[in-house]
Image (cartoon, rainbow, N blue to C red):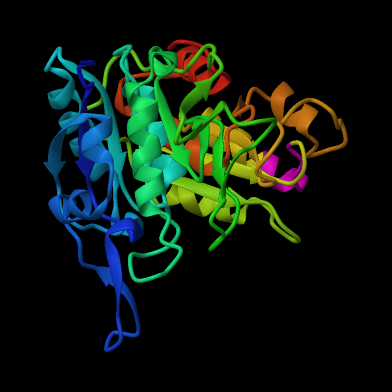
């Protein structure tokens, strides 16, 4: 008889554990971790589950302190050498940020798989059970070993630094931003390709360096917002530029002034896919930003670049080490 793998499941809340309250007029937290595991068929056939129940918190309520606390629980679970992998269950609203944050701090070869649901448990097409079963399969898969933190929903598996929520309500809201997902999972198991190099912090910070502001370039966006963020005490700033990194030249002026004052500024694209780069050399074009020494977020989204700055600075990184972290190198 084949021994079942031991998988830790860390439950934090989210739509996957909600039902509709007609008095409140919408979905509200209902199921705790034990309640969720009890109603998902087939889990006990897939793995020996070790449950960590952290409450019923909507993902939109999470902060960096919560993310680091959950990271500590994941580390606690991995203290058991018999654990093959960890599944973290949460709401989807901030999942692309939390998964990336945990990925930056994850140095164990055993995988962490983050999942949730786009439908609540009152809906006939509740996707929670399938997502949870799929995530347990991925966490138990030998192909996931060394893959860091992965995201698994709607049968697709994504790398934590490449995933984005692309739709507010669709079942398949989560996509790999560029190219195909890392793999697929179904009732017959998981198929994954190797992930490749990851960004990894040298140490998990005790706290994030906050605040980190995001300034989104749009029509008539000059440097006023960035100047204001600096005056308000920002530890770092992310500029979500148009296209491949283009803005009004006054926004670049403000970024250069902030960086000269010791406040790191990272350039990302507001488009959500592709990378910023030195493609346009007009004033405020991406080439002028990079020539000015502004940090490049590469293909990270603005919210993920914010996570990297907050945790990287919190871990004591600065200068070229912070630049390397954003660029995708080991810091």
In percent of the image, x 57 and y 19: which residue is there? 327
In percent of the image, x 30 and y 86: which residue is there? 22
Span highlighted in magenta in the image: 245-252
In percent of the image, x 51 and y 40: which residue is there? 155
Please tell me whether residue 251 belongs to the stretch shown in magenta: yes
- Where residue 195 appears, as percent x and y from the top left, is 53, 17
Displayed quadrant of residue 108: top left
Instruction: Judge by depth and name the residue closer to the eye, 8 or 137.
Output: 137
- Note whether 122 is above or below 40 in the view shown: below
- Where residue 326 appears, as percent x and y from the top left, is 53, 23
- Note whether 250 is above or below 191 in the view shown: below
Please tell me whether residue 61 belongs to the stretch shown in magenta: no
Displayed quadrant of residue 204: top left
Picture quarter with the C terminus: top left
- Where residue 244 appears, as percent x and y from the top left, is 76, 36
Instruction: Judge by depth and name the residue closer to the eye, 235 or 303.
Output: 303
Left or right of 31? Residue 324 is right
- Note whether 141 is above or below 98 in the view shown: above
Furthest residue to the bottom? 23
In percent of the image, x 30 and y 59: which residue is there? 58
Instruction: Judge by depth and name the residue closer to the eye, 320 or 279.
Output: 279
Residue 309 in sight in this render:
no
């Amino acid at each position: 008889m084949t021994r079942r793998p031991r998988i830790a499941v860390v439950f934090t809340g989210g739509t996957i554990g909600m039902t509709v309250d007609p008095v409140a007029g919408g979905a509200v937290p209902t199921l705790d971790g034990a309640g969720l595991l009890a109603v998902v068929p087939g889990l006990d056939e897939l793995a020996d589950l070790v449950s960590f129940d952290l409450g019923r918190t909507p993902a939109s309520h999470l902060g960096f302190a919560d993310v680091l606390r959950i990271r500590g629980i994941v580390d606690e679970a991995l203290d058991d050498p018999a654990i093959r992998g960890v599944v973290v269950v949460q709401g989807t609203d901030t999942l692309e940020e939390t998964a990336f944050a945990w990925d930056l701090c994850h140095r164990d070869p055993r995988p962490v798989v983050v999942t949730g649901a786009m439908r609540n448990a009152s809906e006939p097409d509740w996707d929670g059970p399938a997502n949870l079963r799929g995530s347990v399969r991925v966490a138990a898969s030998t192909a996931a070993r060394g893959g860091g933190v992965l995201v698994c929903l709607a049968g697709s598996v994504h790398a934590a630094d490449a995933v984005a929520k692309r739709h507010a309500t669709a079942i398949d809201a989560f996509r790999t931003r560029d190219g195909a997902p890392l793999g697929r999972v179904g009732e017959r198991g998981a198929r994954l390709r190797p992930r490749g190099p990851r960004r990894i912090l040298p140490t998990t910070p005790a706290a994030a360096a906050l605040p980190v502001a995001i300034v989104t370039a749009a029509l008539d966006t000059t440097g006023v917002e960035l100047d204001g963020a600096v005056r308000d005490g920002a530890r770092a700033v992310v500029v979500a530029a148009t296209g491949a990194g283009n803005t009004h030249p006054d926004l670049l002026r403000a970024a250069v002034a902030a960086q000269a004052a010791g406040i790191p500024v990272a350039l990302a694209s507001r488009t959500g896919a592709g990378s910023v780069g030195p493609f346009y050399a007009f004033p405020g074009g991406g080439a002028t930003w990079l020539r000015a020494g502004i940090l490049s977020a590469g293909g990270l989204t603005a919210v993920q670049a914010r996570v990297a700055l907050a945790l990287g600075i919190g871990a004591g990184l600065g200068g070229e080490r912070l630049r390397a972290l954003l660029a995708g190198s080991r810091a």
